[in-house]
Amino acid sequence: MLTSGNVLPSAPQRVLIAGVTGAGKTTLARRIADRFGLVHHEIDALHHGPDWTVRPEFLHDVRAFAATDRWVTEWQYTSKGADSILAPRADLVVWLDYPWHIVRRRLIARTLKRRMLRTRLWNGNVEPPLWSREAWNGDNDILGWQTGTRHKWDERMPGVQEFYPHLTVVRFRHPREASRWLR
């Protein structure tokens, strides 16, 4: 496993960004796309249809971009079949393994901003208003989701390296490391 101080063995062609909700996967994916001339495919936009339903074309769209030569995406929806499509094709995993206080603060800020401004997301979806009961219950409880999946990548990454030995994994423990690495 590499860190921010290591040089990559080659320029990345197909990149997965792993990390807990709120770590900054999409932001870093965009930066990596710009830095290495890759196409960023925002996986949330492929997954979420109107009214937060799963788009029937989701896995078809994932297969289509995964078959191309140069891309970067967030490593999500692993239980919905995307994992078995993306991991075999990727050559680099960037793991955002940031401290809890950083990812929690980022997610709270993002959630409050989206809910107060009623930000339109993928396929016209809008997070529920701050003051609504549904905003903090069930499927809409993004903070609860983050808490429940907080250790997912710590538990999963050893298996990733075992099952996909072709993947180079770069682990960042702080956003400063990711910024330094991109430079």
Image (cartoon, rainbow, N blue to C red):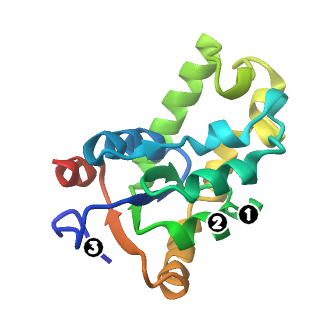
Left or right placement of residue 137 versus residue 3 in this view: right
Q: Nearer the viewer, mark 2 or mark 1?
A: 2
Relative height, residue 72 to residue 84 (above, below): above
Q: Tags 2 and 1 in contact by the CB under 8 Å rule?
A: yes
Q: Nearer the viewer, mark 3 or mark 2?
A: 2
Q: Nearer the viewer, mark 3 or mark 1?
A: 1
Query: Callout 2, which amino acid?
Result: Ile
Is residue 24 something one can see in this rendering?
no
- Looking at the rendered structure, the secondary structure element under dot 2 is helix
Left or right placement of residue 91 versus residue 155 in this view: left
Q: Residue at x 51, y 55 (%)?
A: 68
Nearer to me, 160 or 172 = 160
Query: Callout 1, which amino acid?
Result: Gly
Q: Distance of mark 2 from mark 1, alpha carbons? A: 7 Å
Q: Tags 3 and 2 in contact by the CB under 8 Å rule?
A: no
Among the two numbered marks 3 and 1 on one chain, the one whose residue lies closer to the N terminus: 3
Q: Residue at x 59, y 66 (%)?
A: 152
**Residue 11 image position (x, y, % from top left):** 26, 62
Q: Pointer 1: what residue? A: 81
Query: Callout 3, which amino acid?
Result: Leu
Which numbered disc covers residue 85?
2
Nearer to me, 113 or 179 = 179
How many other residues sit within 10 Å of disc 2, few (<14), some (14-19) or many (≥20)?
some
**Residue 169 image position (x, y, % from top left):** 37, 71
